[in-house]
Image (spheres, rainbow, N blue to C red):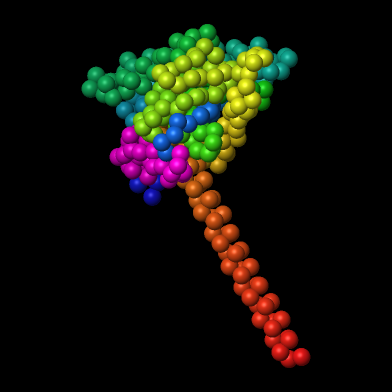
């Protein structure tokens, strides 16, 4: 049952999910490498939240629908419901990008905002004092959406997920992504995901690295010797005993270091697999806790699948060896019987 999975996640919490990731690292790690200092690669990505692409008109219409539901539930008689007006204004907004009707579409958008403010204020006035506390947080959220401007920071992009942030990673096909930032650590030698952490703030990549390295230390009881990152981490060079390397022009670079910088690019397909096959592409779990747990569970799932693939490969090899043995034995007995008949 889906509710059982929700209850299980809520019961174990973020600490329990980290224990699952720790176990996935332990079962994948070769015995001879458990006490050695590792060289890891680090990178960040955006795990998008399960919300629609946010626009002001969408948010205003959702607030209007919420106000209608509150009025029906609390038996509030609205002075005007604006049902037909909203329908007409929505039809006018369809032509926002046309040449001759763009001005009327912009006017319709402003009118929808005005109507939204009217309904929110009327609901706040007519709610009984005994019931006002039930809807106070929702009404404050609606007022915050109505008062925010284009240049504001910490804007609301979704009513059911108000903690969603907007990220711009410079992608041509996707200029803006709405969700939270996830930081991944991958061991360069084995390809095991050694750390995965979520950040709900719009932090610079270099600011996320200390917390991820602390998680690495919690999970593995040791510190990495070197961390190789891209130019997005510019500014941080050292954390405790760990050296952090960013690519830069260096004529005296050694072949070993150059190889490690090249190996750092192997983290990109790992992030691609996490997004495509392990549910990091779109996060369906609710709230900040859901964001934190989703990235850790995705990393643990990929580590466990890596172990399962190695078992499958070993089983296939064993099967092929057995088949080869019986095939050779059959050929031997057939050849021996043919000699005896002649």
Tell me the quarter of the picture where residue 132 sits.
Answer: top left
Residue 28: % across, % down: 46, 44
The image quadrant where one finds the C terminus is: bottom right
Query: Considering depth in this image, is 187 or 172 the residue closer to the camera?
Result: 187
Residue 250: % across, % down: 64, 14
Q: Residue furthest left?
A: 130
Q: Residue at x 54, y 24 (%)?
A: 228
In the rendered structure, the answer to whether residue 4 lies left or right of residue 308 reads left
Residue 47: % across, % down: 51, 29
In the rendered structure, the answer to whether residue 269 lies left or right of residue 239 reads right
Q: Residue at x 55, y 22 (%)?
A: 229
* Residue 72 position (above or below residue 27): above
Tell me the quarter of the picture where residue 272 sits.
Answer: top right
* Residue 139 position (above or below residue 191): above
Q: Is residue 82 visible?
A: no
* Residue 85 position (above or below residue 187): above
Query: Considering depth in this image, is 184 or 57 the residue closer to the camera?
Result: 184
* Magenta portion: prevailing SS class: helix
In the rendered structure, the answer to whether residue 337 lies left or right of residue 197 reads right
Q: Residue furthest right?
A: 342
Residue 102 is a magenta residue: no
Q: Residue at x 49, y 36 (%)?
A: 193
Find the magenta span and give its range. 5-33
Q: Residue at x 71, y 81 (%)?
A: 335
Query: Considering depth in this image, is 106 or 73 the residue closer to the camera?
Result: 106
Query: Considering depth in this image, is 252 or 216 the residue closer to the camera?
Result: 252
Residue 35: % across, % down: 41, 36
């Amino acid at each position: 049952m889906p509710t059982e999975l929700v209850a299980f996640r809520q019961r174990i919490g973020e600490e329990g999910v980290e224990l699952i990731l720790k176990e996935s690292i332990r079962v994948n790690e070769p015995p001879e490498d458990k006490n050695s200092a590792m060289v890891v690669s680090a990178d960040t990505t955006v795990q998008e939240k399960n919300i629609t692409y946010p626009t002001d008109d969408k948010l205003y219409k959702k607030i209007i629908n919420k106000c209608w539901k509150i009025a029906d539930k609390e038996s509030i008689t609205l002075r005007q419901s604006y049902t037909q007006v909203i329908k007409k204004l929505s039809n006018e907004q369809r032509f926002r990008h046309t040449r001759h009707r763009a001005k009327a579409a912009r006017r319709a958008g402003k009118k929808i905002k005005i109507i939204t403010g009217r309904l929110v204020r009327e609901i706040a006035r007519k709610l009984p004092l005994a019931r006002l506390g039930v809807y106070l947080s929702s009404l404050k959220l609606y007022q915050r959406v109505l008062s925010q401007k284009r240049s504001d920071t910490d804007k609301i992009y979704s009513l059911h997920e108000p903690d969603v942030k907007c990220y711009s990673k410079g992608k041509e096909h996707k200029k803006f992504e709405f969700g939270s930032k996830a930081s991944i650590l991958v061991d360069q030698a084995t390809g095991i995901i050694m750390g995965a952490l979520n950040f709900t703030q719009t932090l610079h990549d270099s600011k996320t690295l200390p917390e991820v390295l602390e998680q690495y230390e919690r999970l593995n009881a040791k510190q990495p010797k070197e961390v190789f990152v891209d130019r997005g981490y510019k500014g941080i060079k050292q954390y405790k005993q760990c050296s952090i390397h960013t690519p830069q022009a260096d004529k005296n670079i050694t072949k070993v270091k150059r190889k490690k910088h090249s190996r750092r690019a192997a983290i990109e397909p790992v992030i691609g697999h996490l997004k495509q096959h392990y549910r990091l592409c779109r996060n369906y779990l609710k709230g900040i806790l859901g964001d934190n747990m989703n990235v850790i569970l995705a990393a643990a799932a990929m580590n466990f699948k890596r172990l399962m693939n190695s078992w499958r490969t070993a089983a296939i090899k064993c099967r092929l060896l057995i088949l080869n043995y019986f095939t050779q034995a059959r050929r031997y007995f057939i050849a021996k019987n043919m000699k005896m008949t002649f």
